[in-house]
Amino acid sequence: MTTVARHPSVAALRRRQRAGAFNRRVGWVLLPVMVAATAVHYLPGDRSLLAGVLVALVIGLNTTHLALSIYVFGFVRPRRTLKVFHIYFGYALGVLIWVSQTNLHNEPMHTYLTILMFVGIAVHLVLGTRYAARRRAAQQVGQRYLSGG
């Protein structure tokens, strides 16, 4: 029995789609870890070990999220579209997160960078939610089409 091999471009597209889905999960794990790292840093008392562990997690998750984003989207040709803005805004946000989280003992710069970081995250989440809704709508249309409904 023989099987039909997929075209390489279809296989590459499927790999990028799976990487994109995994990357969204990494982002949703990164968010509460980042909130926890920020809270631990600003809470009274000495929690330097916990803060260090959380910051290391933030840096690792952020690096993974950024690397997967570059794998999935690449460096697209600059255009005046919301999608392209979201991609490059996300790349810049990744760098801002690194800078913010590696300057913990450099006040007041760390505080300003953290505020900027969370504003950027809010914008990134709003745009991401918009694209999640579009993906879901496209999946539902595709399922209706395939089921003959």
Image (cartoon, rainbow, N blue to C red):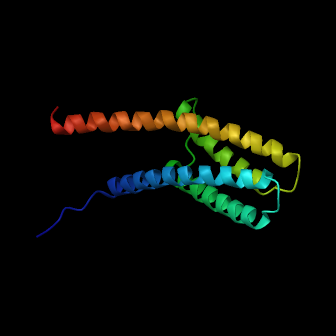
Q: Is residue 54 above or below residue 108?
A: below
Q: Is residue 50 left or right of residue 111?
A: left
Q: Observer-nearest residue: 2 or 144?
A: 144
Q: Is residue 111 above or below residue 26?
A: above
Residue 55 image offset from top left, x and y in percent: 71, 60
Q: Quadrant of residue 47?
A: bottom right
Q: Quadrant of residue 80?
A: top right
User: Can see residue 78?
Assistant: no
Q: Observer-nearest residue: 37 or 67?
A: 37
Q: Observer-nearest residue: 7 or 117?
A: 117
Q: Is residue 126 left or right of residue 6?
A: right
Q: Quadrant of residue 79?
A: top right
* Residue at (79% x, 44% y) in the render: 113
State which quarter of the image contains the C terminus: top left
Residue 25 image offset from top left, x and y in percent: 49, 52
Q: Residue furthest right?
A: 107
Q: Observer-nearest residue: 81 or 41?
A: 41
* Residue at (19% x, 61% y) in the render: 4
Q: Is residue 23 left or right of residue 54?
A: left
* Residue at (79% x, 64% y) in the render: 48
Residue 145 image offset from top left, x and y in percent: 21, 35
